[in-house]
Amino acid sequence: MSLIISLTCALLATLLQQWARRYLRVTGARHSLHKQARIRAFFAEGLRKRYFPWVVEALPGLLHASVFLFFAGLPIFLFETNQKVFIAALSCVGASGLSYLLITFMPLVFYDSPYHTPLSTLFWVLHVGIRCFFLELFKLVIKFAVKFEVKFPTRRPWPTVNTVHVLSALARAQLERLRGGLVKEMKSYAHRSSWEIDARALSWAFDFVDDEHELEQILASIPGFYKSSLVKDSEKILSTTPASERISNAVLQLMDRSLSSDLVDETVRKQRSAMCLKALEILPDLQHTTIRQSLRFIGTEVFKWIELGVLADRDDSFEAKCVTALITAHTRGSDERWLSAMVHQLDLSEPIPQGDDLMLYNLLDFVLWMLFHYDIVPHLDYKAVENVSTALRKFDIAGTSPELQHQFCSMWNDILEFQEQLEPHPNVLQDSTRFDDWQRMRTKAQNLVRKLSRDMGRHLEDNFPVDFARRVVRNPTSLISLIRFLINRNATVYDALHPNRDPAIPVHPVSTDSWGEYRPAEPLYLCHHPSHGHADNPV
């Protein structure tokens, strides 16, 4: 039987191929449009009337039946021939049969399963048909009970006419499922799926797109996707971490390519910039994610995108401060669109520094911001802080104004002296309960803030020194380790300003955690150069 069915399958496959070619040849002949449409409709109706799709579906079923018969006959044949071979063959047949059953029932349980056999549809029809049959049978029983007023001993009167209506609705629903088929059931389930599948689909779309024009089309559709009434929970979809990160990376990649290529027209750049900005402005989460992700693009042309800095200017996070500092470093004050935001960020006054003066002022402002907000600097993301610091140091300090050199040396001395005061016991507050120790730490922290704000010419709120001291008392180790990091990273700037420094006054910095382990603990030096001090406050 297996051989006969196999040969029948081979013959049927050949016939199906011939029939398909004949159909394509007849319907594909060149005619006028209305004649060709009529011919296609005529033969397509013939396919439906003669159950051609069923014949195509029957071919794999016959082939499977042939394999089943062969597997069933093989162990029977080997049973009397060789027991060892019989056991081995039976084991293989059993494993294959079990795998086939699992594949058969998998699409009935998991509607997104790609695995399927000809028996899957049959078992699904039997499953739904049996449910429909028993619902109809139960409905008839309940209908009979209601008609003859048969009541069961329950707390509430049951059954009732409403019970019959409920059973009728359930039976109709099962009958509709049976008429629609398994494929329609799977599609219906896909439409009822949660919004998370849409978020994953959006992420996949960005993963498989590399062409600039395709990327531009997808980004241009984001606002429409967010506002569409057909998309449920669009805000949740765009706010998920995978989707927001994919959108942010796509925006940054597109703008990097646009700003770094001379082949892109200025009009196209402006259009892409406006489009990306429109996509990011629909949700604050997208803006925050883009600002955070942009730190991975240090060294690229992304930081020539002024609109990114405008977004960061509205934020108070560490990442936003890094972005504004990097854009200032890239533009060097030459872009008028960034001028107002730069003045706001750096608290500049006339005359506005230019060239290396602006770069040094930008570095000083960034270091001061990190010191005053040390508790929100991401100590675990060392690489990002390192890259930002490196990018901001690309200037020649020897050509800067004496006033800014004074500020740099004053800040350098202030933070070195603060560290030197805490050098013997940087973790004293963690082991001490004495009020005097806490009070001394508060006083030192407040003095540091006041000296830095005075020497750097910055205006702070009246309660800021007290608030800063309170934060330092809670976590002094992080501040000391940040000072260690800043001194080590800016030592090259200090060396460029002091090529012949005096080695007689070394200050040994304290290494308290992983931030201090990236560089060896080398002696550092206070600035005592007479020309680097203010007239009213010499160093």
Image (cartoon, grey):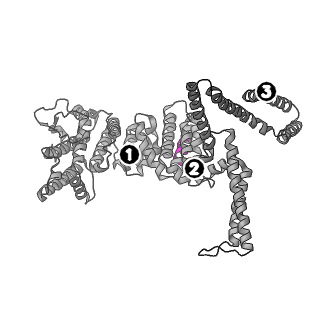
Position in image of residue 196 (x %, y %): 54, 49
Tag 2 residue: 223
The label number, if any, that marks residue 146 in the structure image: none
Residue 149 position by quadrant: bottom right
Question: Is 466 on the left-hand or right-hand side of 382?
Answer: left
Label located before the other in sequence (3 or 1): 3
Residue 49 position by quadrant: top right
111 and 539: which is toward the camera: 111
Mark 3 or mark 1, whichever is nearer to me? 3
Give the CA distance from mark 3 to mark 1. Answer: 70 Å
Kind of residue indicated by mark 3: Leu
Q: Secondary structure at mark 3?
A: helix
Tag 3 residue: 11
Q: Is residue 422 visible?
A: yes
Q: What range is drawn magenta here?
A: 272-278
Position in image of residue 172 (x %, y %): 72, 59
